Image (spheres, grey):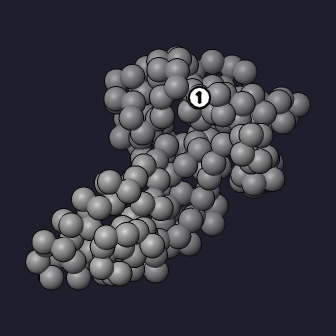
Amino acid sequence: MIKGFPRPMARIIEEFSRMPGIGVRSAERIAFYLLRSPGEYVEALARAIREVKSNVRFCSRCNNLSEHELCSVCSDPSRDASRICVVEGPNGVIAMEKCGIFRGTYHVLLGQLSPIEGIGPEQLKIKELLERVEKEKVKEVVIATDFTTEGETTALYLSEVMKSGKVTVSRLARGVPVGASLEYADVATLQRAFEERRGV
């Protein structure tokens, strides 16, 4: 328990500080902000959190975020099902959709390979990707993992496991800065990286 605060404040500070990117100081600021906010705002925030937890799920086909069994991309008949863009998380789908250049479907791995953290192929949605490639007669897989060490490791692994198949495997070009996440790339950079993708 965090010392010096009443028990409810200490508890909410602890809960906020467990979130990624939020330390104890930031958690304290958020807690004080909520304490000073009108009750209606706090209630609306609590409802929004409950609604996200209750109504948002992963698409049964691609693992993107969705309110339904299939996400908006997978349920769109105008999308080219023969092309799959592989991203690490739903943020990657959002980033690609913002640039509007890709009209295929996606596959969200829900992570990246990281031997140091004990994350191997079994912990990601790689088996499901390979099943989709086989079942849906996919012609091209575009690997759009981040240009970090873990993202590159994931891309290399995916290119190896799909090398023997009939599918064309490509990787986003290096227009996205090394060490950057897709969600922080600007639209022009992301568009250039996609247009200049190369075979792997």
- Report the side of 80 relative to 14 (left or right): right
Q: Position of residue 122 (x, y in %)?
A: 81, 53
Q: Which amino acid type is marked by label 1?
A: Thr
- Report the side of 12 relative to 138 (left or right): left
Q: How many marks?
A: 1
User: Please, is residue 84 above or below residue 66 in the view?
Assistant: above
Residue 81 in sight in this render: no
Residue at image position (84%, 36%) is: 161
Taking depth in this image into account, of 86 and 181 the one nearest to the observer is 181
Residue under label 1, please give it.
Answer: 148
Residue at image position (60%, 59%) is: 63
Residue at image position (30%, 79%) is: 6
Residue 8 in sight in this render: yes
Quadrant occupied by the C terminus: top right
Taking depth in this image into account, of 15 and 148 the one nearest to the observer is 15
Q: Secondary structure at mark 1?
A: loop
